[in-house]
């Protein structure tokens, strides 16, 4: 399978701060997805990206499809306690039906 | 609207016992279906995916197998569980919109 490197592995931030995380791959993807997972639950889709350079927002979340098509970025502005969870990136290869996942970024927001 | 059902939510099985996890999707036809496994605090590993009835692709050779007896039904099985089969198992579906949606997961403990 494909290896997606996601960083940082964990983040501890103060409420109100902005958050940035990224995901890189050695392969070219035609789709990048960003998810949030809370303990004991399935990941929930936050943002989907389909074109190089695409910038998409969902409330305080903004994600970008890297122009090399091998990376993607997620930003969370003005973090709040309910942003706590593990954030995953996922990519789909140009040739194939598989979705591969990053290693996750654990976010802790300190009130 | 589309929904995905996965059961059971929790399962404790002895080593050497068989396994059957079931997943069904409602509100869509001919979805791609996926089984992922997640070790505690880790990323999601793609195990199997299916693009149609009876069509199964395996990503990782292991002690598990998958079947798709009906269009919206996906089953994960094992004849004899190993300790290393413990984990959080997630079923997911996608359609040509290139988004992936997850079920609520099954926490499997093999003792």
Image: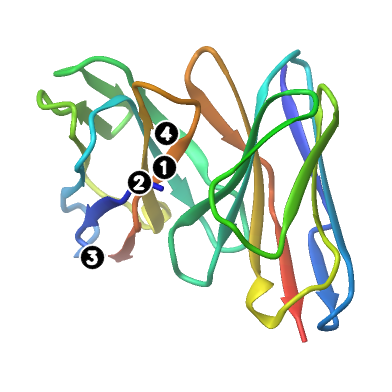
**Residue A85 vs residue B69: left or right?**
left
Mark 3 vs 1, N-terminal side: 3
The x and y percentages for residue A51 are 24, 14
Tag of residue A11:
3
Mark 1 or 4, which is nearer the eye?
Answer: 1
Mark 2 vs 1, N-terminal side: 2
Discs 3 and 1 lie in a common subunit: yes
Residue ID for mark 2: A2
Mark 2 or 1, which is nearer the eye?
Answer: 2
Mark 3 or 1, which is nearer the eye?
Answer: 1
CB-based contact (under 8 Å), mark 2 and mark 1: yes
Crowding at dot 4, Cα within 10 Å, few <14 / some 14-19 / many 20+, comes out as: some
**Residue A89 vs residue B36: left or right?**
left
Cα–Cα span, label 3 and label 1: 22 Å
Residue ID for mark 4: A46
Crowding at dot 3, Cα within 10 Å, few <14 / some 14-19 / many 20+, comes out as: some
The x and y percentages for residue A19 are 18, 50
**Figure check: B22 above or below B98:** below
**Figure check: A102 above or below B101:** below
Cα–Cα span, label 1 and label 4: 16 Å
Residue ID for mark 1: A100
User: Could you say whether the residue bearing mark 3 is in a helix, strand or loop?
Assistant: strand
Cα–Cα span, label 3 and label 4: 19 Å
User: Could you say whether the residue bearing mark 2 is in a helix, strand or loop?
Assistant: loop
Mark 4 vs 2, N-terminal side: 2
Quadrant of the rendered structure where residue A23 is? top left
Discs 3 and 4 lie in a common subunit: yes
């Amino acid at each position: 399978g494909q290896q997606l490197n996601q960083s940082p592995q964990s983040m501890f931030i103060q409420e109100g701060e902005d958050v940035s995380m990224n995901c890189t791959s050695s392969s070219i993807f035609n789709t990048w997805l960003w998810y949030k997972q809370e303990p004991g639950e399935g990941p929930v889709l936050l943002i989907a990206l389909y074109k190089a350079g695409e910038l998409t927002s969902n409330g305080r979340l903004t994600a970008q499809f890297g122009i090399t098509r091998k990376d993607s970025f997620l930003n969370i502005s003005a973090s709040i306690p309910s942003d706590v969870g593990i954030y995953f990136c996922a990519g789909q290869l140009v040739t194939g039906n598989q979705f591969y996942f990053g290693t996750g970024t654990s976010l802790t927001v300190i009130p | 609207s589309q929904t995905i059902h996965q059961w059971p939510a929790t399962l404790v099985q002895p080593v050497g016992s068989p396994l059957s996890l079931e997943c069904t999707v409602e509100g869509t036809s001919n979805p791609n279906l996926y089984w992922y496994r997640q070790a505690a605090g880790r990323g999601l590993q793609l195990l199997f995916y299916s693009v149609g009835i009876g069509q199964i692709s395996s990503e990782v050779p292991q002690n598990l197998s998958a079947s798709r007896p009906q269009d919206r039904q996906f089953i994960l099985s094992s004849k004899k569980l190993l300790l290393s089969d413990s984990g959080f198992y997630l079923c997911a579906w996608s359609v040509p919109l290139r988004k992936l949606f997850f079920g609520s997961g099954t926490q499997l403990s093999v003792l």
